[in-house]
Image (cartoon, helix red, strand yellow):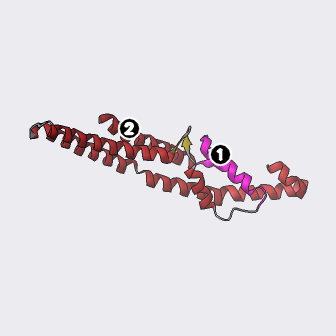
Amino acid sequence: MFGCLFVGIFAKLFLGFLYQNMIRESDNMAVTENKALKQCKQRYANYCAGRRSMPNVSVFVERFMNRLSVGRLAFSGIYRMSEQGMMLFVLAAGVGVYTSIREGHSTGKIVPYYIVAFFGLYLYFSISSLVDIRRKQQVLKVNLVDYLENYFLPRTEGSKKDIEMLYGEDTTQHLLA
């Protein structure tokens, strides 16, 4: 029972830490050390190499964020694991209550299951509101869209123009790729 509670809370905290780290790194995307953010910049640069701009940067960023993972475990999987751990915790408390009633235990032996379930739920939802994964996702998305639309693309286009002026239009594709 407590293992499920621990998994639910730990997964939520771990995911919050990952997003917070990415938000901190996305504030200065030009020199980021985060592999996922570097990959996002590279994919965007590769896409824009043959085109003037990307028609919908927010969709590109959403697709990128949907693919975020730690090893083989997707961020969305960690989020669901957190919720499932909490649901299993509540289920285990219910099984404890059922078993106690079936064995004919007194109310004094049944109430602790309710108390533990109540405080476990309170703890989980308190941590969930402090971590606020959905808000962190929104902040990260805004940071990435802002960087890609307002800083990265204009620099890339300026570099293309400089290379075209120096070496001619034919070499631009080869030098920026």
For label 1, count other residues whose C-alpha is less than 10 Å away and answer few (under 14), some (14-19) or many (20+).
Answer: few
Is 173 drawn above or below residue 113 in the view shown? Answer: below
Horizontal relation, residue 139 to residue 60: left or right:
left
Camera-side mark, 1 or 2: 2
Q: Position of residue 142 (x, y in %)?
A: 54, 58
The residue identified by callout 1 is 39
Q: Amino acid at mark 1?
A: Gln
Q: Is residue 97 magenta?
A: no
Q: Considering only order in the chain, which callout, 2 or 1, is on the residue closer to the N terminus?
A: 2
Residue furthest toward the bottom?
A: 55
* Camera-nearest residue between 165 and 93: 93
Q: Is 33 in the magenta?
A: yes
Q: Position of residue 146 (x, y in %)?
A: 59, 58
The residue depicted at 9 percent of the width and 38 percent of the height is 106
Residue lying furthest front in this view? 102
Q: Residue 123 sits in which quadrant? A: top left
**Residue at 38% across, 47% down:** 83
Provide residue 70's location: percent of width, then percent of height. 54, 39
Label placed on residue 107: none
Q: Is residue 19 visible?
A: no
Label drawn at residue 7: 2
Would you say the magenta stretch is mainly helix, strand or loop?
helix
Element at label 1: helix
Between 161 and 140, the one lying in front of the other is 140
User: Could you tell me the amino acid type at mark 2?
Assistant: Val
* Bounds of the magenta segment: 28-51
Is residue 96 rendered to the left or right of residue 75?
Answer: left
In the image, taking residue 135 as reference, residue 26 lies left or right, namely right
